[in-house]
Image: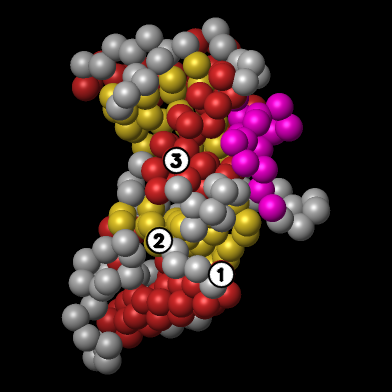
């Protein structure tokens, strides 16, 4: 079985794929200092808790934080006896090479999103991934990742207001009922939430105009559900899109003799 690991700047997600479906998905915070032994203790405790006993033979990793890969490699070798496939490394093949400026290294999460979206929907897709950053990943008709947009994430925007302005408290994001806030917390929530709705709407509209063909818009990532209710921004919400992309990349590398 395949263990797929998607490591973002905030959270690291582990999912076990049995070849047909995900058996379980566990989430922890991202820390480059977490050791292989600590990963295993955490992972095996959750497996026991949920009564899942997978026979992990392969590991695939996408990490937007290069430093964490070191300990994840040791984790994979020590506990599953396998060398992990790391997306973005030269030895890892992609079904379609990205078409971006020379020297650009697209985030491995964006490469996985593109592969996952192409596998499910064919090309001409925009993936909107609400993580630490909010990225828009454009997938061409042949499945290639061809670039997109990186915007400050929702929580980063809230954090920036709090850290940059002495009188502004830390606020959690939520959808305000109205736009005109009548206290500081409501004003901040309104600015970030409705500002974000404007950002998403505007960027999708501009991407579509520039791309010049009809496109499907898929949302994913930790904070995507927040923008799922009420507004008609996306064609679909797919929680597991990055993970799905990782399983497809792994299969492709197996079929092509890399593993
Ligand atoms: N269910 C949730 N409710 C509120 N915030 C969440 C939830 N899930 C994730 N987050 C927050 O959303 C942000 C992005 O999450 P995630 O997609 O895991 O980011 P990344 O992939 O960059 O690590 C993080 O700041 C995280 O704390
Ligand atoms: C844009 C990102 C920071 C998003 O990371 P995340 O929010 O998932 O942690 C990541 O994809 C990244 O570091 N990209 C490298 C630059 C690029 O994609 O062009
Ligand atoms: K991500």
State the residue at coordinates (31%, 57%).
236
Q: Residue at x 62, y 59 (%)?
A: 147
Asked whether the viewer can see residue 113, the reply is no
Taking the image as shown, residue 10 lies to the left or right of residue 100, namely left
Residue closest to the eye, 129 or 139 = 139
**Residue at mark 1:** 211
Q: Quadrant of residue 55?
A: top left
Q: Which mark is residue 146?
A: none
Per the image, is 102 magenta? no
Residue 107 visible at all: yes
Q: Earlier in the sequence, mark 3 or mark 1?
A: 3
Q: Is residue 241 above or below residue 213?
A: above
Name the residue carrying label 3: 119
Q: Say whether mark 3 is within 8 Å of ligand 3.
A: no
Q: CA distance from mark 3 to mark 2?
A: 13 Å
For disc 2, the marked residue is 216
Queried whether the magenta region covers residue 86, the answer comes back as yes
| Circle 3 Cα neighbour tier, 10 Å, few/some/many (<14 / 14–19 / ≥20) | some
Q: List x then y, in percent, for residue 258.
A: 65, 19
**How far is mark 3 from mark 1, CA to CA?**
20 Å
Residue visible at 40% across and 15% down in the picture: 1
Q: Which residues are magenta?
A: 85-99
């Amino acid at each position: 079985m395949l263990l797929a690991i998607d490591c973002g700047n905030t959270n690291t997600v582990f999912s076990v794929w049995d070849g047909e479906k995900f058996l379980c998905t566990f989430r922890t915070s991202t820390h480059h200092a977490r050791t292989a032994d600590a990963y295993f203790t955490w992972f095996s405790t959750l497996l026991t808790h949920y009564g899942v006993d997978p026979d992990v033979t392969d590991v695939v990793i996408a990490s937007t934080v290069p430093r964490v890969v070191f300990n994840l490699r040791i984790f994979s070798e020590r506990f599953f006896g396998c060398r992990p496939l790391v997306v973005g490394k030269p030895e890892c093949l992609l079904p379609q090479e990205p078409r971006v400026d020379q020297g650009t290294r697209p985030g491995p999460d964006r490469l996985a999103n593109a592969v996952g979206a192409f596998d499910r929907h064919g090309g001409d897709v925009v993936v909107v991934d609400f993580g630490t950053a909010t990225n828009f990943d454009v997938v061409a008709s042949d499945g290639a990742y061809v670039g997109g947009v990186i915007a400050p994430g929702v929580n980063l925007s809230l954090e920036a207001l709090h850290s940059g302005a002495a009188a502004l408290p830390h606020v959690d994001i939520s959808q305000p009922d109205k736009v005109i806030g009548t206290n500081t917390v409501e004003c901040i929530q309104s600015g970030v939430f409705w500002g974000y709705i404007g950002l998403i709407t505007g960027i999708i509209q501009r991407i579509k105009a520039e791309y010049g063909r009809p496109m499907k818009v898929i949302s994913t990532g930790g904070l995507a559900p927040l923008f799922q209710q009420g507004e008609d921004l996306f064609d679909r919400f797919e929680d597991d899109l990055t993970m799905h992309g990782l399983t497809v990349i792994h299969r492709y590398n197996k079929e092509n003799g890399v593993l």
